[in-house]
Structure formats: C-alpha cells, structure tokens
Image (cartoon, grey):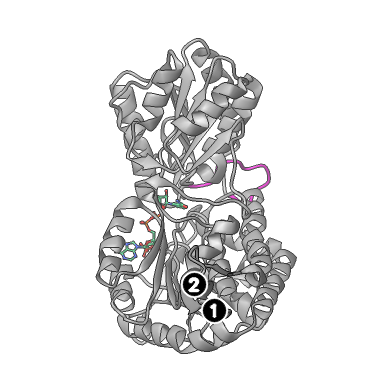
C-alpha cells in the first residue's frame, strides 16, 4: 500500500456510538508529517457538543458491555491483536508518517502496543473475588470486583498506538466503556485502530473517539459529567496536575502517567559494552521522545571520558532522515517547539561549562530535525538536568561514590524510571531500594513490557498500566457481609 493509499484509508471523522460522523461544527484540523511539515490529512475537529454525545454513547453502552461475558470481551481483544499484527506494516507506516519515528521503531511499537491486547484478552476471564469467614466466625465476607464504569482517556503523541492500547485493552477487559481523545498531533493511528476494533466486532458505544484542536474545551463536559467514573491520562506533568484538579470535583478514579527525568547511572564496576548499548537504547529510542528516555547520564568519574568517547562514536554513525528511509536511526522531532527546547537546553548546559562532543544544532531545511548530540561535563544547576529533554541529546555528568550517585539521581521531582549499570549485584539490589522511581532497568536500557506494571512515583504519576496490576485500575472492589449460614 502506498503512503497516499494508506492515508486515504484512515477515517477522517469522529467515532461516536458506533458511527463515524463529522464534527457538529463541520470544522477540521490538519495533521502534519514532521519530516516535511506538510499536511497529510484533515480530520474532524470535535466540539463540546460532540464530547457530550460521546459521553452519552459510552454511558449507554456501559451496562450491556459490563454484562458481556468476560470470555467474549477477551476474545474481541484477541481478534484485535491478531488483525493488528497481520497489519503491522500498515500501522507502522502510519505512525511514522504522523509522528516521525523510524519504521523499524514503529514496527516495534505495533508489537509492544499489540501485546496489551493479547495480555488483557487473557486477563479478562481471570478477574476474581474472594470468600471467607470473618475472624469472629459470625459471618461470611464476600469480595467481588466490578467494572469501574465509563472512562475518559487522554493520550500523547509520542507512542500513538501503544498509549491507546495500554488503556483501551484493560478497560475493555474489565467491562468498562471508553471515550478516547488522542493528541491533536497524532490522531490518525487511534482512528485507524478503532476502525480495526469495529472490524473485529466492537459493539456500538463501547469505544468512542474524539479528535480535536481544543482539548481543554471538549474535556470539560466529560469531566463534569456525573456518569464518568475514571480518567486515565498520559502526558506532561503540568497538564496532569490540572486534570487531577478537575477530577477532584467528581472524586474520579485517576491514572496518571506523567513526565520523567530518568537517571542512568554507570558505576565503575559496570560492563562498559553493556552500558554503552543500554545508553544508546535508553536515550535515542523514539528520537529521545519517551517518558522513559534516559535524561541524565550519571557516570563514575573514572569512566566518564571513555564512556563519552564510546557513545559519541556510536552517535556519529547514526543516519538522520525521514523515518521511512532505510537505515535511519534519528527521524524528525515532533515540531518546532521540540527543536527549540533541545537547542535551549544544550545552549544552557554549554554556557555553564559543558562541552559538546558531537551535534548540538538544529538541522536546516524541511522538517523539524535536531542533530543527535552528546554533551559532557554538565554541571549541577544546568536546566538539562532538571527538565525533560525529549530529544536526541545525551547529557553526561559525573559522581565519585555510590551515595553521591543516589543523591544526584533522586534530586528531581520526577520518579518514573532509573537505569543502573553495575556488575556488583549487591550494589544493584541496593539501587533497587535507594532509587525513588516506579521502575528500574538493571543492566538493560529498555524495560517496557505488557506483562509488567508500568508507572511512576512522585510527580511522574499515579497508578500502573500493564501487568496483573493493570486491570485493577478499571475495577471497583465491593465487599459484602452475610451472617454465618451455619449459625
Ligand atoms: P501533553 O502536552 O501533556 O499532552 C498530552 C495529551 O493531553 C494530549 O492529548 C493533549 O491534547 C492533552 N491535553 C493538553 N492540555 C489539555 C487540557 N487542558 N485538557 C485536556 N487535555 C489536554 O503531553 P505531550 O507533549 O503530548 O506528551 C509528552 C509528555 O507525555 C512528556 O512529559 C512525557 O514524559 C509524557 N509521557 C508519559 C508517559 C508515561 O507513561 N509516564 C508515556 C508517554 C509520554 P493536545 O494534543 O490537543 O494538546
């Protein structure tokens, strides 16, 4: 399928109550290819009235979806998994076109995103309660799990497929209905995915999609609707904080997958080959635009020069270009703002004394490209140590002993993930307990897996997605007491 055939096959309307429909305003929004800056598709731009209609549809479908046998809900997810994998190339190309990542990485996201469908198809029939005597022996305690109810999902642009399936799959498995609002920058993958769900038998109203250029305005009627039970958001911490405040008015259940500022610690006893491989993966995957991206390389002073030289050599071998081209490792950043941010962070680090080993500049011409960059000798107080870089910039600072490494690593309001490279397993275990993060990579640079509980502590968020924990975000526990039937 050519790029234009694929783009033409993606729905350009809202999906509400099982029907594709135009926005009530008749307006559309443009979707761009970040490698060229050109508009690739125009799609419906939802209004608050559309949001109310989507909420109505999700609320109406809730009872029958919750009553659908768990096995049937799981089988729908499994069919979706099979079809998604069959159409891997199509979804991969679509993600590359709207988001920019290299095709090989988009294919990887189809696998990763698809695994949530498979995992939760298997979890759906395993939801269980418990039954037992109270300690006094006077009664029986019954604990059951029920679907929370209609959910509202807001997703970011950096993983257009996986951030949607990581929420939709557990919600559907648990028996919840959904309204989802993808990022305005990358809405096509969600629209295409929901069309796939429709093809495998999704009942009307169970998943509803709103694409919009006014995310605040369309979220308001949903978040203030008494029928909504849950908000799950993936995105930046400031937007998450504002949504949490709105969710408080209705005491909504919330899951918040927010920003990160991951430390990547290389101890003097690390295997440097493993550390360099891990660094390249943890930093440059997704062009550095991942919440799990290593943001601060904290390297023992005895190794810092060699580490910097070795990562620089690898980075100098990267091919930069459009994600559809063979061999490209670094595609465009999502937009001009992302380029300006990477540039400003590098300039601030250099002004405070850091050295640029390679890269450091925006690339002129079409598209929003930034050179893959290594900066070393970054000094405390630099903005690059405090802010999420969200770009292909590897920033190195040093430490002298374990206590200092831990202090630097934890010196952030974020707590999503930390990476540690050491061959001393006792030290590795100490790091598991010492780092204030929800996740850790011990001698590995990529850890995401549908079977694992993904999520952060501190201002990186609340709740977990994936793993055995993931479905519980969509279940409400109910406890019932009955008298001892033998008394
Ligand atoms: P963002 O600006 O916070 O946007 C995320 C989503 O929120 C988008 O759909 C956006 O819609 C929407 N949004 C923005 N303002 C809103 C409002 N007032 N009301 C309702 N919705 C609103 O984040 P981003 O730039 O897309 O994504 C990057 C961030 O996501 C980074 O901080 C990254 O670390 C984080 N992230 C976290 C995880 C995790 O699992 N912890 C995973 C991936 C990304 P529009 O597109 O219309 O602005």
Residue 267 is situated, as x and y percent measured from the top left of the image, at 53, 19
Residue 181 is situated, as x and y percent measured from the top left of the image, at 43, 70
Residue picked out by circle 2: 138
| Image quadrant where one finds the N terminus | bottom right
Q: Are marks 1 and 2 in contact (CB under 8 Å)?
A: yes
Q: Is residue 257 left or right of residue 307?
A: left
Q: Is residue 91 left or right of residue 381?
A: right
Residue drawn at point x = 39 percent, y = 87 percent: 53
Q: Is residue 75 above or below residue 17?
A: above
Dot 1, how many residues are within 10 Å of its Cα: few (below 14), some (14-19), or many (20+)?
few
Tell me where the magenta segment starts and ends, as one range. Answer: 323-332
Please say whether residue 415 is one of the residues in the magenta stretch: no
**Is any part of residue 276 visible from this angle?**
yes
Q: Which of the labelled discs sits on residue 487, or is there none?
A: 1
Residue drawn at point x = 47 percent, y = 76 percent: 480
Image-quarter location of ligand 1:
bottom left
> For numbered disc 2, what is the local secondary structure?
loop
């Amino acid at each position: 399928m050519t790029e234009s055939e694929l783009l033409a096959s993606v729905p350009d309307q809202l999906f509400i109550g099982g029907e594709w429909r135009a926005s009530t305003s008749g307006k559309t929004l443009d979707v761009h290819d970040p490698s060229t800056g050109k508009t690739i598709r125009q799609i419906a731009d939802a209004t608050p009235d559309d949001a109310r209609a989507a909420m109505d549809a999700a609320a109406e479908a809730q009872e029958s979806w919750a009553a659908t046998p768990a096995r049937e809900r799981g089988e729908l997810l499994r069919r979706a998994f099979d079809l998604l994998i069959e159409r891997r190339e199509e979804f991969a190309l679509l993600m590359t076109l709207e988001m920019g990542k290299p095709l090989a990485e988009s294919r990887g996201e189809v696998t990763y995103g698809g695994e949530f469908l498979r995992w939760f198809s298997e979890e759906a029939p395993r939801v269980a309660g418990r039954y037992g005597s109270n300690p006094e022996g006077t009664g029986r305690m019954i604990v059951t799990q029920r679907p929370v109810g209609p959910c509202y999902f807001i997703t970011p642009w950096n993983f257009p497929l996986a951030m949607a399936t990581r929420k939709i799959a557990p919600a559907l498995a648990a028996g919840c209905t959904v309204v989802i609002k993808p990022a305005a920058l990358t809405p096509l993958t969600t629209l295409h995915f929901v069309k796939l769900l429709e093809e495998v038998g999704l009942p009307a109203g169970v998943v509803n999609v709103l694409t919009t250029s006014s995310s605040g305005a369309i979220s308001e009627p949903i978040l203030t609707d008494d029928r909504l039970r849950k908000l799950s958001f993936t995105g930046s911490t400031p937007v998450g904080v504002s949504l949490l405040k709105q969710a408080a008015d209705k005491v909504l259940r919330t899951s918040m997958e927010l920003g990160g500022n991951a430390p990547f610690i290389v101890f003097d006893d690390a295997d440097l080959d493993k550390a360099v491989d891990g660094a390249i993966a943890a930093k440059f995957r997704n062009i550095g635009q991942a919440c799990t991206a290593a943001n601060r390389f904290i390297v023992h002073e005895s190794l810092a020069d060699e580490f910097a030289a070795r990562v620089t050599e690898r980075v100098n071998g990267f091919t930069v270009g459009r994600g559809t081209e063979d061999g490209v490792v670094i595609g465009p950043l999502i937009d001009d703002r992302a380029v300006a941010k990477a540039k400003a962070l590098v300039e601030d680090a250099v002004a405070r004394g850091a050295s640029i080993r390679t890269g450091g500049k925006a690339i002129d011409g079409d598209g929003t490209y930034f050179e893959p960059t290594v900066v070393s000798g970054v000094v405390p107080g630099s903005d690059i140590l405090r802010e999420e870089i969200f770009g292909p910039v590897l920033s190195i600072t040093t430490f002298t002993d374990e206590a200092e490494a831990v202090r630097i690593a934890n010196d952030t309001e974020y707590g999503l993930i930390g990476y540690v490279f050491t061959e001393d397993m006792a030290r590795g275990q100490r790091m598991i307990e010492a780092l204030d993060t929800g996740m850790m990579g011990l001698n590995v640079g990529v850890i995401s897996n549908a079977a694992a509980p993904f999520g952060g502590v501190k201002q990186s968020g609340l709740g977990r997605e994936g793993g055995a924990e993931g479905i519980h975000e969509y279940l409400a526990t109910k406890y019932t007491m009955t008298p001892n039937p033998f008394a």
